[in-house]
Image (cartoon, rainbow, N blue to C red):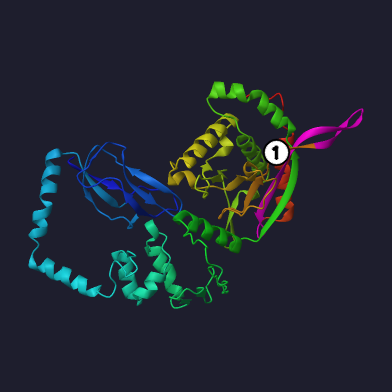
Amino acid sequence: MAQVELIMPKMGESVAEATIIKWLKKEGDKIAADESVLEIATDKVDSEIPSTTEGTLVKRLFNEGDIVQVGKAIAIISTDTAVVIETLEAKTPVIQETNNVQKDLAQNAVKEVISLEKNSASGKFFSPLVRNIAKEEGIVMTELESIIGTGANGRVTKNDILAFIPNKGKQIISTESKPVVVSEPISSNGMSHNKPSISVGSGDEIIEMDRMRKLIADHMVMSVQTSPHVTSFVEADVTNIVKWRDKVKGNFEKREGEKLTFTPIFIEALVKAIKDFPMINISLDGTKIIKRKNINIGMAAALPNGNLIVPVIKNADTLNLIGITKQVNDLANRARSGKLSPDDIQGGTYTITNVGSFGNVMGTPIINQPQVAIMAVGAIKKKPAVIETPEGDLIGIRHFMFLSHSYDHRVVDGSLGGKFVRRVADYLEQWDINREF
């Protein structure tokens, strides 16, 4: 076959479209099989799209900033050298030989969008799709420029302008160096409230959020507005785990080629507790409770740029400690290097976050929607403790950590939420110090 279409791949069950951030190859460039052709962004993660074949890129079907549906062709790759040369050489003559009908259509199109140029006076770029929507909705250029874009380089996307339409006319934009006042914004729960006006002082630095931070901010606000959060705390004695890990971690790394951290041990205890309390492993759709069959554990990971991402260990209940360890290390390494695929962060049913890695003893985490619970594990600290023995009580040095369990009080009551975190602590405290791996 001389020509192959590069298709926008499926990137998780809830992802239907992606934005092209950057083309890594120009038309005419040679491409090896599996070599990255472009960078794309979804509402979940950024990733690269590799070529499915070796050949030459003869046609890019979309521009940077365009939104493309999953399953659509985004580029044409030719595996036939002769076809490539013919195609590239033919480009200029085809343009020069445009017939009169095509010229008339092009001129009419220019007239239609004369009031909404693709580049505004402030230098912002607006795609043809965004400008067409603006025309249909009667949005003028000053309003279009006021929309905060979440696309590449702050570009306004289709979703941005569609989200703006219901609140059209409610923003008061000041061109002077005065605080911007936003009147009666509508929150996701339908309630209106006034945001505080912000003044900028001399020497203050204004930093625009990057695309991922905007998504995180929206997701956190949505979660708090959706779920009434309650947090229960338990302190667990993890002395046996600390001693066991110190004893086996060297041999574990030699045999398995993997570092043994505490995270896989915490996840194993979580999975056992979820099996005991399956109503923690649910989602809520209106008044319908969806009880999940699979136990997919998300683990919140901080990226080098300070942003947060939650890769998911799928079917964690089918893995032993070695399997969980390999999954944890692989996902953590790929998260730090920006190599996660959209599917890696899909389908989580329960999330764990390690606030102890920042030296914090406890936290009150926000639920990762559409889940109904999340657990934070704190730093492990040595403390004096009363040790009960047949001969009497003694004071000894033990290793303790706090577990913080936040849950959606619409469907998880204090009894279930409290018992669950206590059960996780029980599994940690009952760790067999002579366990083989």
Report if residue 426 lies within the magenta region. Answer: no
Q: Which residue is mark 1?
A: 380
> With respect to residue 58, does 255 lie above or below?
above
Look at the numbered disc 1 and give the secondary structure of its residue. Answer: loop
| Name of the residue lying farthest toward the right | 391
The image shows residue 106 at horizontal and vertical percentages of 17, 68
Please rate how many residues cluster around mark 1, counting C-alpha atoms within 10 Å: few if below 14, some from 14 to 19, many from 20.
many
Q: Residue furthest front?
A: 202
Q: Is residue 133 visible?
A: yes
Q: Position of residue 141 (x, y in %)?
A: 34, 74
Q: Which residue is at the front of the view, 310 or 153? A: 153
Q: Give the residue drawn at x 37%, y 50%.
A: 40
Under mark 1, the amino acid is Ile
Report whether 58 appears left or right of 382.
left
Q: Quadrant of the N terminus?
A: top left
Q: Which residues are magenta?
A: 384-411
Q: Quadrant of the C terminus?
A: top right
Q: Nearer the viewer, residue 412 or 169?
A: 169
User: Can you tell which quarter of the image residue 3 is in?
Assistant: top left
Q: Is residue 268 left or right of residue 179?
A: right
